């Protein structure tokens, strides 16, 4: 009979393959349109062809080649949850033929895709993203078509194997696959070793290694169809209710690939563990003995990577939990902004930022002068003053409207007042530079950096008044900081609340902020309109449809970010639980192998009066050493990082990374993981010791 653990592993790998495939395909659908063979990015145009002519050319291309071509455009009001596909279906035989009538078959319920005829986007600048649905070579043909129209084009294949690897190699789902594979390998090896006596009986009956392995595989061949049928029925029921079985073929293909990869790992572990049982003679095998040296080495080859992986996962889990807590704490600040929106500028003008500056910059300045916007630009303090040995921090470039909504006080506790609506013209008032009193000694360097930000050419045209703020203040930045560059910070980190920032207060609509400064701050989601109607009215009045492609509700976006953070935390907790299970199985395996090899000597030492610790001093010393090394690994790395940052600060260079911040939660999780691993070994060893003593060295 197959060991029960082996059957459990094979059933579990089918279930895990389905779960991971669902999360993977759902993520793909939310990141882009499924089913495409390539993505064509039109980066630039020489202006020789009108937008309507480009649409006609794409429709003609799709019909001639029998492929679907769709342009993706974000929704103006909800770009984080809604996208628009303007489609040339290319004929009745294409994948996209029914999308115009029946809609896009969305896999994820978290994202909405609305399909329109390509002709509906005929007046919009043709630069942007186009999906190709058809043979891979069709993308190259479309690239040539665009080139003939005077456009600069780049082709990519986001759903190719290479594209997916590049995108997901550092993703938590990849880590989930790795930890599940490690768990399956560990449990399979342990199950085979626990079945050593049964394999010894088969060997005594004359069966060879190949014969026993084929026997196990035949029994698995009977077990697999039943397990697969149960999993398939559960999956079909769930997907039928979730998305009406959309993209079932893609989901099945991904699940099958994952299942095959996991099955290959499991079968290799099965064969390797079975080969280990053949390292001892038939008679010792009948007593359950194992080749202790080879088996112990194999187990430690699993345990050490598992410990490293578990520590890494534990660190990621604490980071994810802190991120969730931070986002939840910041929700009140976002609720206070009401219906406020930030704007997103079209990436089609990345090669022509001067056009954005000419069209968007003046509009934003006029809106600022009317008090319609909150300006909250962000700069890194160290990067703004290289060589000045400044501490890490941020510079906020704000307007008077920001100061009216976000309180800041001086060292005496008096609030700085907004000068919006002052009778004095904006250009006649000074720019105010507010520096925390904790940075008073760095005032000259900070002042110089602020002058360079507002007046890059250092013409001396900007009057600046320096004042102090009370240290320890936290101010709201109106976004998480993900669009702004700050050295050493993860883009996904929520930095909505900024502690002790240097604040540059520029009068509303003054000449001190240039047009390109307004557009640069807007690309950081740092220009916020409290009333969304001002955005839609401005786009219509200023004819900015080509330049402003969407507006993002500030409060809604943070809710979506919190949902993503919660999903990430759940995945990390899942990974941590599976990693802990691997450590538990490996710990029991070490003690099992040790006990079966040394049963007689353990019993003899016990009846001779040896103490428990003396009998197992070598194994205990090894396990305690492993526990100490792994308990101190993360704190030691944090110490090394701090030393490196001190060296950078001494050289006047900005920090290139954010040091690991060890909180009580981090230390608690790491300590708990190490204690759990060591306790598993100690408990398993105590169990086997008592069993040996009780049975009198007749075997475990």
Image: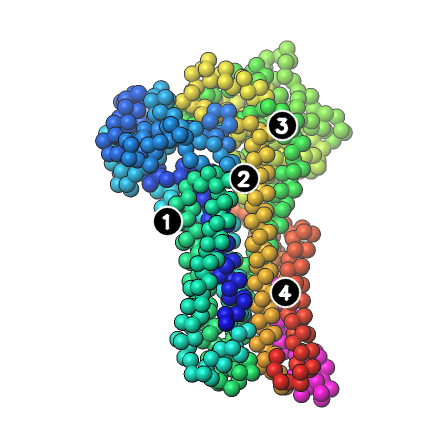
Q: Secondary structure at mark 2?
A: loop
Question: Quadrant location of the C terminus?
Answer: bottom right
Question: Viewer-nearest of labels 2 and 1?
Answer: 1
Gap between marks 4 and 2 measured at Cα: 38 Å
Task: Name the residue tied to disc 1.
Answer: 161
Q: Are marks 4 and 2 in contact (CB under 8 Å)?
A: no
Viewer-closest of 552 and 103: 103
Where are the magenta residues, as a range?
602-630
Tell which circle, 4 or 3, labels the residue nearer the N-terminal end: 3
Q: Residues within 10 Å of mark 2 (few under 14, many from 20)?
A: many
Q: Residue furthest right?
A: 412
Relative to 96, residue 416 above or below:
above
Identify the mark nearer the N-term, 4 or 2: 2
Which is more N-terminal, label 1 or label 2? Answer: 1
Q: In x, y percent, where is residue 56?
A: 28, 23
Q: Main secondary structure of the magenta part?
A: helix
Q: Secondary structure beneath disc 3?
A: strand
- Residue holding disc 3: 433
Q: Residue 179 placed where, x, y %? A: 52, 58
Q: Residue at x 66, y 81 (%)?
A: 692
Query: Is residue 606 located in the magenta-colored stretch of the structure?
Result: yes
Read off the residue under disc 2: 486
Q: Residue placed at 59% from the left, 16% from the top? A: 371
Residue receiving disc 4: 677
Q: Is residue 140 left or right of residue 496?
A: left
Q: Which residue is most to the top? A: 423
Question: Label 4, label 1: how many angstroms apart (C-alpha)?
Answer: 37 Å
N-term mark: 4 or 1: 1
> Earlier along the polypeptide chain: callout 1 or callout 3?
1
């Amino acid at each position: 009979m197959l060991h029960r653990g082996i059957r459990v592993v094979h059933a579990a790998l089918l279930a895990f393959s389905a779960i991971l495939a669902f999360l993977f395909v759902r993520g793909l659908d939310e990141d882009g349109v499924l089913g495409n063979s390539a993505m064509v990015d039109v980066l630039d145009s020489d202006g020789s062809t009108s937008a309507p002519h480009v649409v006609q050319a794409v429709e003609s291309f799709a019909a001639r080649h029998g492929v679907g071509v769709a342009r993706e455009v974000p929704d103006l009001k909800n770009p984080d949850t809604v996208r628009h596909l303007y489609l040339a279906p290319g004929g009745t035989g294409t994948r996209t033929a029914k999308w115009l009538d029946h809609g896009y078959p969305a896999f994820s319920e978290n994202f909405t895709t609305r399909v329109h005829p390509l002709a509906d986007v005929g007046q919009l600048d043709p630069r942007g993203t186009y999906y190709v649905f058809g043979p891979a070579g069709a993308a190259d043909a479309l690239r040539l078509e665009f080139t003939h129209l005077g456009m600069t084009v780049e082709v990519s294949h986001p759903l190719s194997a290479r594209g997916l690897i590049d995108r997901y190699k550092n993703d938590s789902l990849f880590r989930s696959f790795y930890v599940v594979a490690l768990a399956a390998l560990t449990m399979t090896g342990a199950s085979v070793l626990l079945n050593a006596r049964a394999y010894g009986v088969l060997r005594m009956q004359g069966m060879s290694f190949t014969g026993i392995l084929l026997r196990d595989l035949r029994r698995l061949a009977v077990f697999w169809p039943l397990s697969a049928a149960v999993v398939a029925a559960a999956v079909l029921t769930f997907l039928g209710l979730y998305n009406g079985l959309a993209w079932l073929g893609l989901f099945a293909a991904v699940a099958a690939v994952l299942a095959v990869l996991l099955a290959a790992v499991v079968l290799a572990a099965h064969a390797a563990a079975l080969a280990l049982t053949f390292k001892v003679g038939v008679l010792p095998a009948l007593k359950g003995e194992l080749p202790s040296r080879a088996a112990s080495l194999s187990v430690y080859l699993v345990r050490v990577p598992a410990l490293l992986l578990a520590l890494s996962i534990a660190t990621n889990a604490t980071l994810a939990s802190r991120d969730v807590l931070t986002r939840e704490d910041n929700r009140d600040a976002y609720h206070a902004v009401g219906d406020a929106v930030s704007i997103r500028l079209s990436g089609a003008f990345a090669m022509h930022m001067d056009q954005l500056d000419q069209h968007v910059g003046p509009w934003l300045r006029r809106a600022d002068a009317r008090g319609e916007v909150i300006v909250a630009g962000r700069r890194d303090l160290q990067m703004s003053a290289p060589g000045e040995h400044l501490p890490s921090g941020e510079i906020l470039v704000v307007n008077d409207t920001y100061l009216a909504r976000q309180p800041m006080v001086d060292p005496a506790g008096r609030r700085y007042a907004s000068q919006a609506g002052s009778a004095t013209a904006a250009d006649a008032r000074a720019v105010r530079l507010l520096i925390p009193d904790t940075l008073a000694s760095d005032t000259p360097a900070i002042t110089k950096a602020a002058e360079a930000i507002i007046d890059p050419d250092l013409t001396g045209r900007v009057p600046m008044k320096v004042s102090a703020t009370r240290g320890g203040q936290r101010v709201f930045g109106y976004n998480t900081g993900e669009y702004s560059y700050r050295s050493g910070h993860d883009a996904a980190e929520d930095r909505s609340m900024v502690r002790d920032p240097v604040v540059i207060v520029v009068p509303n609509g003054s000449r001190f902020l240039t047009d390109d400064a307004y557009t640069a701050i807007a690309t950081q989601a740092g220009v916020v309109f409290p009333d969304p109607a001002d955005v839609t009215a401005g786009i219509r009045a200023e004819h900015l449809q080509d330049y402003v492609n969407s507006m993002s509700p500030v409060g809604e976006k943070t809710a979506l970010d919190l949902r993503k953070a919660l999903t990430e935390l759940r995945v990390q907790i899942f990974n941590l639980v599976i990693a802990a299970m691997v450590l538990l199985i490996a710990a029991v395996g070490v003690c099992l192998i040790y006990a079966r090899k040394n049963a007689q000597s353990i019993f003899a030492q016990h009846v001779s009066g040896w103490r428990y610790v003396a009998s197992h001093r070598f194994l205990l010393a090894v396990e305690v050493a492993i526990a100490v090394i792994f308990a101190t690994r993360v704190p030691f790395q944090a110490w090394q990082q701090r030393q490196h940052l001190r060296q950078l600060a001494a050289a006047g260079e900005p920090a290139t990374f954010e040091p690991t911040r060890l909180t009580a939660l981090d230390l608690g999780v790491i300590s708990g993981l190490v204690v759990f691993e060591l306790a598993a070994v100690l408990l398993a060893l105590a169990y086997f010791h008592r069993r040996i003593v009780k049975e009198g060295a007749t075997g475990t």
